[in-house]
Amino acid sequence: MRPKRLAMFYICSASALPASIQAAGVPAQNDVSNCASNSSLRRERPEREDLSEAYEAVDTRDLVQPPSGRMVVVHDFLGFLLAVLISYFVMYRQASSNLNNSIDEVLKQDVAAQK
């Protein structure tokens, strides 16, 4: 039954092709009424056995798995750790800049006192 349905599909779809393609040698049946008379072939529902053969070797598992709870915890921990490291780095730069400014002021006063 399946090859007959497939043949009818190709015949009916080829009958809708433009005349220039049909003239180029594409075998097509121009009788649209033939497609309409055989529409019962297209409307038949395939039996369950036909579908089981078609999808026998298809992997139907879910491709997208939800993240595990442990992965979420690790992700949150790494994000928190990154935020802490960035804040420590910023505070270190500010503190070292303030310390350098203070040392420069002390050295300027020491040089002025020696003169």
Image (cartoon, grey):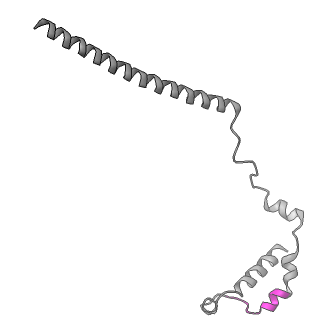
Of the pair 62 and 69, the residue shown nearer to us: 69
Corner quadrant of residue 41: bottom right
Q: Considering depth in this image, is 76 or 115 the residue closer to the camera?
A: 115
Residue 62 x, y percent position in the rendering: 74, 48
Depth order, front residue of 87/79: 87
Q: Which residues are magenta?
A: 27-36
Q: Quadrant of the C terminus?
A: top left
Vertical arrangement, residue 36 with respect to residue 100, above or below: below
**Which residue of the protein is positioned furthest toward the top in this rendering?**
114
Q: Position of residue 59 (x, y in %)?
A: 74, 52
Tell me where residue 82 appears, x and y as whole percent: 51, 28
Residue at screen point 76% across, 79% down: 9
At x 42%, y 25%, the residue is 90
Q: Count the marks: how many?
A: 0
Quadrant in the picture for the N terminus:
bottom right
- Within the magenta stretch, is there residue 35? yes
Q: Quadrant of residue 65?
A: top right
Residue at the spot 89% in from the left edge and 66% down from the top edge: 47
At x 88% / y 62%, what residue is drawn? Answer: 49
Query: Between residues 93 and 72, which one lies in front from this camera angle?
Result: 93
Q: Is residue 115 left or right of residue 14?
A: left
> Among all residues in the image, which is located at the extreme left?
115
Above or below for 112 versus 94: above
Based on the picture, tell me whether residue 115 belongs to the magenta stretch.
no
Does 69 appear above or below 24? above
> Compared with residue 52, is residue 71 higher up or lower down, i.e. above or below?
above
| Residue 89 quadrant | top left
